[in-house]
Image: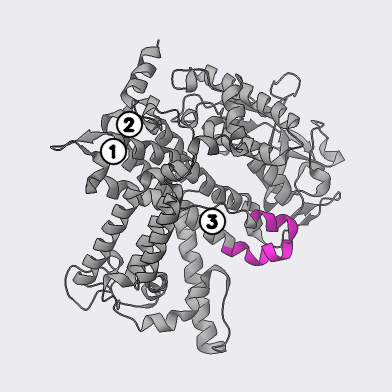
Amino acid sequence: MKNNNKINKINKINNDSNDNKDNAINRLIVIQNHLSPGSIDLARERENPGFDAYKIIQRDPELYIPGGHPFDMTLKEQRELVMKQILRYQKTRQALKNDPLLCRALELTMGTYSEAFWMRIYVHDTLFRQAFEMFGTKEQYGLETTATYDKTTKEFIINSPTLGSTKIWIGMAGQTATHTVALCQTIIDNINYGINWFIVPLRDIPTGKPLPGIIVGDLGAKYGRHGLDNGWIQFCHKRVPREYMLMKWSKVTIEGIFIPSPNPALSYITLIGERFSVLYGAQNALGQALTIACRYGCIRRQGTNNEQIMDYQSHYVNLMPGVAIILNRWSQATKLAQTNQSEFLEKINDFHAISSGLKATLTWWGSEVLERVRRSMGGHAYSAYNTIGPAIADWGVTTTGGGDNFVLLQQTAKYLLDIFKNIIVIQGEEGKRKKIGSSVIYLNGFQKYMKITQCNLSNENQLYDLDFTLDIFTWLLNGAQATSSLWNDNQIGNSDSNSYYFNKNQIKMIKNVYLEICKETRKIVIPLVDAWGFPDFILKAPFGRKSQGIIKSLLEKIIEFK
């Protein structure tokens, strides 16, 4: 009956509302009531089959981390733990092979539970396998041999001619990898045909010892991800069969004739999938950190009237934008390379620009979110047991891995400028009816936006209109590139001057709406972070527990330390 009254009340509010602002707030109310702990039996819901993967981890002594966290373990102990987890994980997956959904759920939850485990699985199942799928032929899948051939019997010699050519930061190369896929300059009859991918055996499978022609070592202490054995590799005239070159795109015949790929950029396409995968990693890492910070902010009280610190504007304005981000995993790009090669080749430049821009923007934003989380928890965030410090250490590599962010943004910008130049030529000389598509379709309207010099924002309600805000962003992308006026601070002015896109009053309206949305999100922040579904044992942090008594939980962790 209470739920019916809530629904009727919401419907009445929606019917009486005539502006976009009220509609936006009402949607938040609907979400709040939908997720409210009082509206459903959470204990019953947590017993549904969707939580089976969590139960498998929590109840398995070889998957569960001893003591609930790895922060007091040595480097050797962490790596041994991760290898035991991987062995147990593979055996468990084999036992669950008739339940593919549960297998997938176990993979994702284990990745959420242990960053080092996830990186080992990711390097092997995604990066290494993806190289086969994108560059290899069907006959080259699953090679396990370590046979070598003499050059006269058509083999490649893999060599590291200088110290600078040493492969560094290769995942699992330090102690465990038996093979690698190496990007090398391809030389035939003293002619360099550019870079291609080669399978190179590293270790003898029965003994784990490096093979002849392989010099390999561990990188030792790192900033984070201690359970992953990143290493370095030097190839000393290592011989591999011709068939160990991945030849879906580029090929070398038995006679030594090189057949180039249709697009030189194909040599780097594995990085496209890697960059898109950062979206899932962000949802996992940032989601856990924000859950911990938001729960702590609602329990911690301070001030004259003993207020929750989450109710201070300076506190919730820092955290709510991170909570509001909704991320999806992109997989279309890598699937196209395997299923529709012609379409993939047609869109490869677009995929590259999107993945580069998203990866750079998201990982830098993630660093900012984690820093805000750290500051929001005061000195307690400095305790490894509350997991924020380790999360920052683990996240840092994402701004460099898969491509340095500065370089990636330059590549995205170059793509946009090249497309923009082409549009000017197409619409100005070759006929105005021809349009471009894909992710840059908005640039077709550049002539319209060139004529706009000021935003037509007149009241705050307009900012709740998605079409209106999209027009603003479209102007930023079109007008900013097309106009020759001074581009400074996103065309935001601190006066009523007509030389800026936004005037002083418009800036004030934007700020007011921003603060109001943050305040409304703060009201439902606990149902929102609860909806992400991270159990306490996954979060590991005493200050992230669903129940109160966080200080007691932290002290218990400290007392356990020996």
Residue at the location (53% across, 53% down)? 328
Instruction: Report whether 260 appears left or right of 477.
Output: right
Camera-side mark, 1 or 3: 1
Instruction: Report whether 422 appears left or right of 90.
Output: left
Circle 2 residue? 381
Residue at the location (72% across, 59% down)? 261
The disc at residue 375 is 1
Q: Are marks 1 and 2 in contact (CB under 8 Å)?
A: yes
> What is the x, y in percent for residue 139?
84, 46
Instruction: Report whether 19 appears left or right of 287.
Output: left
Q: Magenta residues? A: 334-350
> What is the x, y in percent for residue 411?
49, 60
Q: Nearer the viewer, residue 502 or 230?
A: 502
Q: Secondary structure at mark 3?
A: helix
Give the amino acid type for the residue marked by disc 3 in the picture.
Answer: Ser
Establish if 188 lies above or below 206: below
Task: Tell me which numbered mark, 3 or 2, is placed earlier along the sequence.
Answer: 3
Residue 339 is covered by the magenta coloring: yes
Q: Quadrant of residue 103?
A: top right
Task: Tally the marks.
Answer: 3
Residue at the location (83% across, 35% down)? 150
Q: Secondary structure at mark 1?
A: helix
> What is the x, y in percent for residue 76?
53, 17
Q: Nearer the viewer, residue 278 or 345?
A: 278
Give the amino acid type for the residue marked by disc 1 in the picture.
Answer: Arg
Circle 3 residue? 355
The residue lying furthest to the front in this view is 1
Q: Main secondary structure of the magenta part?
A: helix
